[in-house]
Amino acid sequence: MRAAENGTAGRLVELVGPAGAGKSTLARAFRSGDQGEWRRLSIWGLPFPLLMTSAVTLVPTVLRALFGGKPLRPAEIAQMIRLGALQLAVERIAGGESRWIVLDEGPVFGLTWLDVFYARNGDPGWSEWRRQTVTAWAERLDAVVRLDAADPVLAHRIRARLQTHMIKDRSDEEIFDFLGRFRRAYDRVLAELAAGGRPVVMHLQTDASAPIGGVPRLRATIEEALDGC
C-alpha cells in the first residue's frame, strides 16, 4: 500500500527523464527547508547487506533463466539486485520522520535501463520477475515527476557537464537516437505502472533552465494530487 494509505510518513516520489534533464539538480532542490523532512535514495550506492539480501532472493529467477536456455547477463543481474535492494531500503525508512522520499534514478529508471539495454520479451525467469517488480512498485510509488527538454538542449548539457556519460562524445544523431530510446522505454514502464497502481505522473519541461526553483510549489502540487487519489 502507499504511504498515504497505510499511515507511513514518507511520500515516495521518483524523478525521471533523459540525461541532462535536471533530475539531480531537482533532487538537491528538494532539500530546501527542513532537512529532516526528506530523504534521497537511488539504486546506486545502497548498503551492502541490502544488496546481499536482494541477491539471495534473486537466485531462483537467475536459475530459471539459466535452465530455460537464456541466462541473465552480469549487468542485468546487478541491476535487478539493485532494484530489490532499493525496495528494502524504502521500506526501512518509510515509517520514519521524513515526509518525502525522493528517488533520483529509482525503479522507473532501473526498469527503463533494463528495457533499453537488455530487452527480453517472454524470456524464462525474466518475465515473472519483471511482472512482480512492476506490481510492487506500482503499489508503493506515489508520484513520478518526469523531466524533459528538447534534444539539442539535452545534447549541449550532456557535453558541457563535468560528469562522464557514454554518449558524451557521440554525434548529435547518435545522442538524439539514444534519448529517443530512453523516452520510449519510459513510456512503456510508466504505462505498466499506471495499469497497476496509477502513481501520479507530472511533466516538467526544463528547456529554459535547470529546475532549481519552485520546489515548494511542486511539492504542494504533488500533495494536492495525492490527496485527491
Image: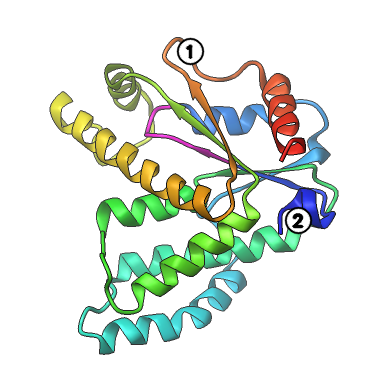
Disc 2 marks which residue?
94
Pick whichever of labels 2 and 1 is earlier in the sequence.
Answer: 2
Assign the magenta stretch its main secondary structure. Answer: loop
Q: How many marks?
A: 2
Q: Element under label 2?
A: loop
Q: Measured from the top left, where is residue 80 in percent x and y?
A: 43, 66
Q: Measured from the top left, where is residue 6 in percent x and y?
A: 81, 57
Which residue is pictured at 64% across the width and 55% down the height? 140
Query: Residue flagged by tag 2: what amino acid is it?
Result: Ala
Q: Measured from the top left, where is residue 190 in percent x and y?
A: 45, 45
The answer to if 215 sits in the magenta stretch is: no
Q: Residue furthest top?
A: 208
Quadrant of the drawing holding the C terminus: top right
Which residue is pictured at 36% across the width and 70% down the height? 127
The magenta-colored residue range is 14-21
Which residue is pictured at 60% across the width and 63% down the height? 87
Disc 1 marks which residue?
209
Query: Residue flagged by tag 1: what amino acid is it?
Result: Ser
Which residue is pictured at 82% across the width and 54% down the height? 8
